[in-house]
Image (cartoon, helix red, strand yellow):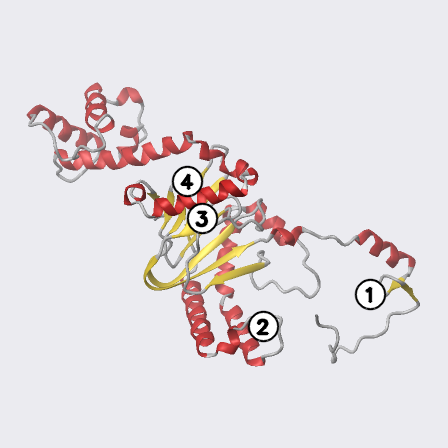
């Protein structure tokens, strides 16, 4: 498998590989001790010629020496070894077992994750996702999917909008009070800056939705068909809500109220260093950059950020809250009343008619 992956044109059969190549790679790559220097080797002219022959057979066009071939194969072996180890560890059953982990065990895992963060020896063992890749479990379910957004302009526009809003609220403390939210009318100026922010996130939301539609068509179709109600807008497409983290990183946690059968999509904005997203159970880190998107199950995977070392880092999380699917109202009774011409007041009592509400006067109706 290693030789097949290392060969640039890897449509080969085992019978096509020289036995000498097998023995050489097995001895000096696969069975090499982890602490051995890859550049150290006995002075063996025959082996040197064999390494050069192997480089030609692998399709390495430039003139190479033994060290170059060994480095190339060693890099491939590290990736393959990680993949094999990953398929065999118990954490492959994470998506099935997380729901049954006790709070005590979750606390232990969080403490362990922080301990790993403080250990350089353990940090270097983490696998880093830097290019588009989907990591799945043995049943093919997505664990982590790193991808590129399809609209660079959307990222720039969203970054400008979030930066403007961030510094605007810093300069206007009343706009970031506990009483301020998109449904509040106590501060008209605040409402306007929120509306501007939401409008300028439109392109980014479209790009995130397109990712879900392209790679998770069934999920997209089901969320798209949900009826929210006549007055519910859809500024984020299929996602009922987002969370914006302004220049902050997250401690290790599970989002226990996110829908387990959905994915959240995370986008990073700004100019920064550090702040890598870490999935400690999977031993994976994602140095998420602007223009990239990472999708994962925020409810079932323990996740958190490394410390930010430089710059300003915002992030936007698109997700589905589990209460979005809970509806305690018995609509069958409502339909029966409609068919029978029965009107009811807010207390559920039968009435002859419903008093018309003055839509220009909401006094006493807000709680």
Q: Is residue 194 above or below residue 79?
A: below
The residue singled out by tag 3 in the image is 303
Which mark identifies residue 346?
Answer: 1
**Residue 319 image offset from top left, x and y in percent:** 54, 54
Q: Quadrant of the C terminus?
A: bottom right
The residue tagged 2 is 179
Image point (49%, 37%), residue name = 94
Residue at 46% x, 42% y is 108
Classify residue 342 as left or right of residue 88. Answer: right
Report the Cα–Cα distance between label 4 and label 3.
10 Å
Q: Nearer the viewer, mark 4 or mark 2?
A: 2
Give the structural element (helix, strand or loop) at label 3: loop
Q: Earlier in the sequence, mark 4 or mark 1?
A: 4
Considering only order in the chain, which callout, 2 or 4, is on the residue closer to the N terminus? 2
- Distance from Cα at disc 1 to Cα at disc 3: 44 Å
Q: CA distance from mark 4 to mark 2?
A: 39 Å
Could you tell me which secondary element the residue under label 2 belongs to? loop
Residue on which the image places disc 4: 282
């Amino acid at each position: 498998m290693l030789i097949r992956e290392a060969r640039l044109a890897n449509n080969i059969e085992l019978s096509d590989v020289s036995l000498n190549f097998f023995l050489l790679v097995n001895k000096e790559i696969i069975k090499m001790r982890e602490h051995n220097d890859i550049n150290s080797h006995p002075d063996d002219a025959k082996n040197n010629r064999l390494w050069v022959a192997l480089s030609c057979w692998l399709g390495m066009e430039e003139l190479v020496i033994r060290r170059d071939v060994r480095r190339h194969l060693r890099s491939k072996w590290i990736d393959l070894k990680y993949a094999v180890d990953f398929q065999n560890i118990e954490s492959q059953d994470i998506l099935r077992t997380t729901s049954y982990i006790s709070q005590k065990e979750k606390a232990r895992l969080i403490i362990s994750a922080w301990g790993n963060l403080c250990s350089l020896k353990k940090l270097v063992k983490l696998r880093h996702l830097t290019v588009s890749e989907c990591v799945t479990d043995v049943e093919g379910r997505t664990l982590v999917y790193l991808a590129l957004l399809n609209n660079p302009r959307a990222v720039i526009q969203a970054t400008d909008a979030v930066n403007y809003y961030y510094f605007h609220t810093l300069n206007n403390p009343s706009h970031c009070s506990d009483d301020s939210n998109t449904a509040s009318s106590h501060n008209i100026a605040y409402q306007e800056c929120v509306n501007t922010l939401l409008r300028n996130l439109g392109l980014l939301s479209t790009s995130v939705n397109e990712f879900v539609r392209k790679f998770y068509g069934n999920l997209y179709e089901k969320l798209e068909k949900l009826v929210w109600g006549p007055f519910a807008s859809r500024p984020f497409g299929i996602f009922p809500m987002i969370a914006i983290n302004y220049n902050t990183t997250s401690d290790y946690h599970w989002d226990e109220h996110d829908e387990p059968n959905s994915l959240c999509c995370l986008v990073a904005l700004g100019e920064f260093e550090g702040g890598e997203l870490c999935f400690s159970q999977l031993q994976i880190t994602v140095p998420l950059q602007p223009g990239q998107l990472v999708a994962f199950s925020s409810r079932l995977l323990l996740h958190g950020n490394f410390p930010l070392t430089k710059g300003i880092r915002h992030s936007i999380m698109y997700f589905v809250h589990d209460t979005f699917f809970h509806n305690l109202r018995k609509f069958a009774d409502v339909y029966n009343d409609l068919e029978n011409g029965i009107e009811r007041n807010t207390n559920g009592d039968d009435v002859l008619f419903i008093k018309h509400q003055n839509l220009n006067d909401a006094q006493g109706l807000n709680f």
